Amino acid sequence: QVQLVESGGGLVQAGDSLRLSCAGSGGTYVMGWFRQAPGKEREFVARISRSSGSTRYADSVKGRFTISRDNAKNTVDLQMNSLKPEDTAVYYCAAGFIGSTRPSDYPYWGQGTQVTVSS
């Protein structure tokens, strides 16, 4: 069983940066970040392969967000720069076995951390 714990969320202004961290990832899983805004479905943000050799981003965050992992520390981070009000959501860390953008392909999830970006 994988236990994932996110941290680093908060309230920031548009243009600011935040760094989210997910503890408990391990090196066995593909790791992903997803987000869910009120009234919307959970959506893919970024994912990273087990070896960090492959990453993928949603078009909406490409060039602004960076996913990274440290398998020795069992952490996966999401560096978010140039934040926009539309980035406001609960952000979730997830672990899975395949490189996918679909939430249903990730069996393990953290509890989420709130990110709020004011204009």
Image (spheres, grey):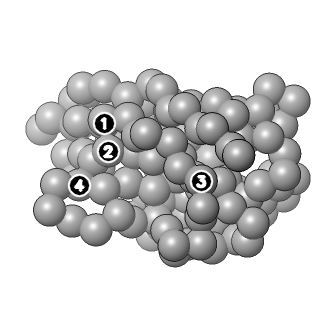
Lower position in the chain sequence, tag 3 or tag 2: 2
Write down the quadrant of residue 11 in the picture. Answer: top left
Q: Secondary structure at mark 4?
A: loop
Q: Position of residue 44 (x, y in %)?
A: 46, 65
Q: Mark 3 is on which residue type?
A: Tyr
Q: Is residue 91 left or right of residue 55?
A: left
Which residue shows up at 79% across the image and 40% down it? Answer: 26
Q: Mark 1 is on which residue type?
A: Val
Q: Mark 4 is on which residue type?
A: Ala
Q: Secondary structure at mark 1?
A: strand
Nearest-to-viewer mark from 3 and 4: 3
Rounded to the nearest whole Å, what is the CA distance between mark 1 and mark 4? 10 Å
Residue highlighted by disc 4: 37
Q: Position of residue 20 (x, y in %)?
A: 50, 33
Residue highlighted by disc 2: 90
Lower position in the chain sequence, tag 2 or tag 1: 2
Mark 1 and mark 4 in contact? Answer it, CB < 8 Å. no
Which residue shows up at 31% across the image and 25% down it? Answer: 10
Residue highlighted by disc 1: 115
Rounded to the nearest whole Å, what is the CA distance between mark 1 and mark 3? 21 Å
Mark 2 and mark 1 in contact? Answer it, CB < 8 Å. yes
| Residue 103 in sight here | yes
Residue highlighted by disc 3: 108
Q: Secondary structure at mark 3?
A: strand
Quick one: quadrant of the C terminus? top left
Lower position in the chain sequence, tag 1 or tag 3: 3
